[in-house]
Image (spheres, helix red, strand yellow):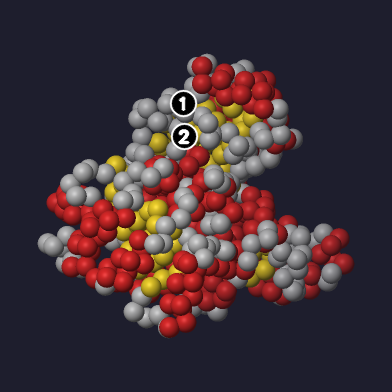
Amino acid sequence: MPSPDALLSSVFGFDAFRPGQREIVDAVAAGENTLAIMPTGGGKSLCYQLPALCRDGITVVISPLIALMRDQVRGLREAGVEAGALTSGNTEEETDAVFSAIDEGRLKLLYMAPERLASGGTERLLRRAAVSLVAVDEAHCVSQWGHDFRPDYLRIGALRQTLGVPLAAFTATADEETREEIVARLFDGAPPRLFLRGFDRPNIHLAFAAKDNPRRQILAFAAARKEQAGIVYCATRAKTESLAAALREAGHAACAYHGGMEPDERRAVETRFQQEDGLIVAATVAFGMGVDKPDIRWVAHADLPKSIEAYYQEIGRAGRDGAPAETLTLYGPDDIRLRRSQIDEGLAPPERKAADHARLNTLLGLAESLGCRRQRLLKYFGEESEPCGNCDLCGRPAEVFDGTEAVRKALSAILRTGESFGAGHLIDILTGNETDKVRQRGHDGLPTFGVGREFDRRQWQAIFRQMMGHDLVRPDPERHGALRMTDPARPILRGEEEIALRKDAMKAAASARPAVK
Ligand code: ADP
Ligand code: ZN
């Protein structure tokens, strides 16, 4: 049986589970009766689709929403999974294709509207079809008191008994009455394993900072947390080694951890981390799967994580004991470039790349956020909340300024030079810096030459970083380092939209001491 982690990336193209998904997937795959309550948009469908692939035979998915079923079937088929739907909207051919896939034992997921259960033919079909799991989406439709009541949902309980297979029910409706009704009607009163957990980890302090001198920033963060167990996530193996060395030099107990190390070396680090107080591990994302230490007091990212899901999973390793824990995530233009090029250079089909870029944008949006970070993070996972009081922006709200003019100047420099140059050269043009390259290309004759002298170089760097964070410019995958304007930037260039930029990021940049090499 392929592992859930392997399937998550190979079939679904995700690099981490969302909050709560992992536990549910494991339980459903193991054949437990489950009731999972997750907010809309939290990622419920994966919690039955993935277990369906782990189990032999067919998973029947009952859902009241025909359009949604068809979408999911299409998505699964594109990912190479045998899935089909029996709905009133089917053509005869579609239905025939589903029947033969069942007869040939190929089908993995069979979507069905509840109305289908009313026909005796369906029961006969399912009896001979080697069904191994029934998943029920929108399980609150079984509640007679709710406004989504679907009488045919009442047949599901009997179906489960006839087939004698486990049942996994999902809903976003959390109130206790509905829950009890679901248990009574779908599970015949025998309580299933219940998953009802908010995603919030209120004891974890959230903070981001623009990457300035990452080594110094991480050392300062660690120095303020002496003798506390922490993890520093790094993007490369080499960096884990050099950071661990720097931390040791600064007097910490620290070691490196990455996938290139021998298995026994890695185990030794895991054991030390588990047993010692106050060890720091500088690690790639390879570190964490097997780590179950409740009192990790801090997690820092020396480089931007891959996605918002990866971010949440990695910071979530801190403070499992519920006591206060702290995090710091550094990010800079190089990270954004790296993550973009990893997506562009990957082998995924275009739609998946577009989705990956969009997910990266969400993380960048969190990094450049103007208001409470937790509120934004939870909203992404489907939970509404109030400002948290436990993130850097709740502590010190972002100061903003109208960046429209600056962004338009930068965009115009990009367009006038044919979208062929990186930020460094563009900043030379904007600040009127007559370098050899500027003169050779005749860029000192451009109307944009020197129009941005009101900001210094570091401030322009902060502006470009924020432009990348807002996805107004993207590195050209074909031309190394060159920045191109994106569609969302057009209305700003045309003067139809304004944009607020963070002042604090620029102040920090301007006041930072020159980098120590
Ligand atoms: P709902 O809980 O509302 O049914 P869906 O299952 O439709 O939510 O998922 C919502 C969105 O989240 C989908 O676009 C899906 O692709 C995405 N998603 C689900 N799980 C993950 C994950 N582990 N990583 C990234 N995106 C995910
Ligand atoms: Zn907050």
Residue 262: give x, y in percent of width and height: 71, 27
Characterize the local packing of mark 2: few (<14), some (14-19) or many (20 or more) Cα atoms within 10 angstroms: many
Name the residue located 60 percent from the left edge and 18 percent from the top edge: 253
Q: Amino acid at mark 2?
A: Arg
In the image, residue 160 above or below residue 516 = below
Residue 490, picture quadrant: bottom right
Q: Which residue is mark 2?
A: 317
C-alpha span from label 1 to label 2: 8 Å
Q: Amino acid at mark 1?
A: Lys
Residue 304: give x, y in percent of width and height: 58, 46
Name the residue located 31 percent from the left edge and 47 percent from the top edge: 34
Name the residue located 72 percent from the left edge and 71 percent from the top edge: 419
Question: Considering depth in this image, is 242 or 172 the residue closer to the camera?
Answer: 172
Judged left or right of residue 65, residue 328 is right
Residue 292: give x, y in percent of width and height: 47, 28
Q: Quadrant of the N terminus?
A: top right
Judged left or right of residue 126, residue 103 is right
Residue 109: mark in rendering: none
Residue 293: mark in rendering: 1
Q: How many marks?
A: 2
Judged left or right of residue 379, residue 307 is right
Name the residue located 53 percent from the left edge and 42 percent from the top edge: 329
User: Is residue 1 among the parts visible in the rendering?
Assistant: yes
What secondary structure is marked by label 2?
Answer: loop
Tag 1 near tag 2, CB within 8 Å: yes
Q: Is mark 1 within 8 Å of ligand 1?
A: no
Residue 263: give x, y in percent of width and height: 67, 27
In the image, residue 125 above or below residue 297 = below
